Structure formats: structure tokens, C-alpha cells
Amino acid sequence: MSTPKNPRAPHAPYFTPLTSPATGTAITPNPPTLFQPLKIRDVTFQNRIWVAPMCQYSADDGALTDYHLIHLGAFAFRGSSLTIIEATAVRPEGRISPEDAGLWKDSQKESIQRLANFVHSQAQKLGIQLAHAGRKASTVAPWLVASRGASLVATNDVGGWTDNVVGPSAIRWGEGYVTPREMTQQDIFEAIEGFRHAARRAVEAGVDVIEIHGAHGYLITSFLSPLSNTRTDKYGGSFANRTRFATEIIMAVRSVMPAGMPLLFRISATEWMEHAAPHSWDIAQTIEFAKMLHNLGVDLLDVSSGGNNAAQKIQMHNDFQVGIAGQIRAALRSSDIPLLLGAVGMITEAEQARDIVGGNEENPGFTAQEEAEATRDIVGGKEPTADVVLIARQFMREPEWVLRVAWRLGVEVQWPVQYGRGKFLRGSKI
């Protein structure tokens, strides 16, 4: 009898043991939808739990460091089927803080490639969120500000760029921010090209998925809203004009991506400004915009909200954003548009995540391909709210959240082979 050999993970530039199937893959037959595979274009995810982008304000001239390898690698190692790198600036003036991640020059690719090598060695997928902070740029890291939720300008002596903060119009976000200068046509062109070239670099660095950041009051959001965009040229005024900047960025990014690579778009579905302004960006406009995305080459809409106005009034509860994703998904399905939806925000419990993507789980009965193409996919009489859940802060608290969720739901999943002796004990309260 031959001696067993510890197999090597394929394509890794160093030895690491093979975990097969990938950690987070359901071994239990007929698992809930949350632990069923989802295929988007040529990429298959073994479960529906993704790591949402989390700003860490810890990059070195835009480059990721060993900190990011440990921070993000921990989630991928423990079973998240997609781990998305934080908001990554496409231009230096598009950073939120001087210590933001960036991909505006070729030298920044190397650190992303190193992270991609590790994530792929674990048979997991890596995404990146490309961003431009717009009028919310040149601020300091949040832990340097006394009040939670407040902001403080990063002045030039600490690496800021107060003379080069830009927006669609010269309207300041609020206290603690610079008043931006209104972007010229050349500025707009350079921003769009910044997204294009950053996407090309991301592909070259080995990422599997790209997300465009169009939420939380950053540059794309501020173009969408009539409260922050008062331009009178082709990028302001009507809905078509206010969405033009976003659509041109989407087309630029898609043009340099392989046909089989998924493209995501994160949006603030509402500004939460209905109480103060007769015209603001709202759910109805988000639905109208979402109906355009599939034909532009976007595969999934990542639904968040708020962040574009200091006077916002958010009606916050555990499912306050999940319900919005459900409204958008229902509208798209009724129009026969197969755009996938991601839910994010205050998702902390296993049963909550299960119900978001599965509805009534008594009889899931749908493949991922059917889910992507169906005009309605009602599961056991209750329609799912979204197709994936994107988790951030709960992963900070529990990097092994995928494994905990599986345990809570009674689903046996693959663990990392190195951690096999550390599985939860039968009868444990997890």
C-alpha cells in the first residue's frame, strides 16, 4: 500500500495543501439556497455569502500591504466564495483618505496579485471595488475624528489634496469636507479613463470579479442625484443626463474585461432625502437605472443606500436595505430582466441570510442558471429578496461566519484541511 501524499494546491506559487472541494462548499445533499452554487458568466461561487468591501485606510501609496493579505485572506480561507477588496481609487485624487487603496499606476498591481495568488490557492474568488471618492475625498481615517460618523479634512501637510477635490458641482457634502471644484469635461474624461485603466490593471493582477462603486455619496452617486448635481451640460439635469457618467464608466470598464468575468455595480438606492427635497435620488429612479444595467454588461446590482447628504434620515432596522433590494428584484423580474441582486446591511444571523436568498426553503428546487434567467423564481411560495448576501462588519466580528452559519443551519460544509481537527463540536452552542 503506497504512502498517501499531501497534495499541492494547483497554480499556487508556493506549497499549500489542497482543500477540495473549496472551503464553504456544502457536503450535505440539497442544502438551502445560501449554500447552493451560483454561476455568473464563467465564474462559479460555491455559496452565496460574499465579503463586502471594507475601507481600512491602511494602504501604502495606494498599494496593499501584508495587513490586507491577513485581513482579507482570513475570510477567503474560511469559506467566503467571493472576497472583495475595499474601495480602490482609480485616480490619486479619488481616494477618501491618503491611506486608501489605489490602482492608478502599474506598480500597485503587484500587491493585488500577491493577494490573488493566496485567495486562488484556497480555491476561492477575489473581487475588487473600483472607486472615486469625488467630493468626499481628502479626509483623514475615521478613528482620528472625535465623533463617530463625523469627518475631518486631510490637509496638504498630512498628504491631503484640498486644492484638487472634485465633484459634478461645487457643492460641499457638509462639515468636515472640502468644497469641491466643478469638474470640467476634461476632468470627466480623465475620471472615466481612470476607471478603464484601473479595470485593466485589476484583470492583469488576477482578480475574478470587478465591482464599480456607485454608492455612499462618492463621485458616481453625486452625479446621479439632482441635489449634488446641478450641471446644465449633458451630465446634469434630466435622468438620462445624470446617469450618463455612470453608464460611460460601466461601458469603459466592461470594454477591458474578459467576456466571462462578472461585473457588479454598487448603488445607493435612495438618498433618504424625501423629507427635505421634492426631487432626490430614490428607489423609483434606481429601478429605472437598474433596468438599463443588464444590457450594459452588469451582472449584479449590489444594493446599499444613503451617504450623499448630511441631512439624510435613514429609517434603520435590521432589514432596512434588504427590503429595498427585494423591491428592485421584484420590479426587474416583472420586466423579464435577469439582473442579479445583492443584499447588504445589518445581516448578522444565519436564518436571516438563509431567508434573504432562499425565501421558504422547504423546496428550493432551482439551479443557479435558472435563477439568473427566470422572470420569477418563487421558492416554496415566497420569493427571495436577493441572490447573494454581502457581509462586512459581521466578518470583522467573526471571520469564520460562513462556517458558523452552516453549523446553525445544519449544513455540513468543507472546512480548510488544516483546520479539520478544529470543527465545532456536536452539541456546541454556536
Image (tube, rainbow, N blue to C red):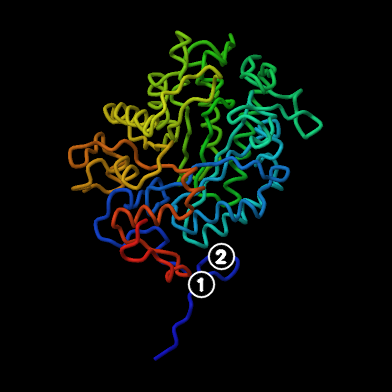
- Look at mark 1 in the image and give the residue it sits on: 8
Where residue 15 sits, quadrant-wise, is: bottom right
Residue drawn at the location 39% of the way across and 45% of the way down: 40
Residue drawn at the location 64% of the way across and 28% of the way down: 191
Q: Is residue 24 above or below residue 246?
A: below
Amino acid residing under circle 2? Ala
Going by the picture, which residue comes out furthest to the right?
157
Cβ atoms under marks 2 and 1 closer than 8 Å: yes
x and y percentages locating residue 393 in the rendered image: 49, 43
Where residue 87 sits, quadrant-wise, is: top right
- Is 351 left or right of 133, judged from the image as shown? left
- Is 386 left or right of 220, judged from the image as shown? left
Tell me the quarter of the image containing the N terminus.
bottom left
Residue drawn at the location 49% of the way across and 43% of the way down: 392
Q: Is residue 251 above or below residue 102?
A: above
x and y percentages locating residue 103 in the rendered image: 65, 41
Tell me the quarter of the image containing the C terminus.
bottom left
The number of discs equals: 2
Mark linked to residue 169 = none
Residue drawn at the location 24% of the way across and 36% of the way down: 383
- Look at mark 2 in the image and give the residue it sits on: 12
Is any atom of residue 278 visible in this view? yes
Amino acid residing under circle 1? Arg
Q: CA distance from mark 2 to mark 1?
A: 8 Å
In depth, the one of 131 and 185 nearer the eye is 131
Is any atom of residue 299 visible in this view? no
Secondary structure at badge 2 equals loop
Binning the other alpha carbons within 10 Å of mark 1 as few (below 14), some (14 to 19) or many (20 upward) gives: some
Secondary structure at badge 1 equals loop
In depth, the one of 200 and 382 nearer the eye is 382
x and y percentages locating residue 156 in the rendered image: 79, 29
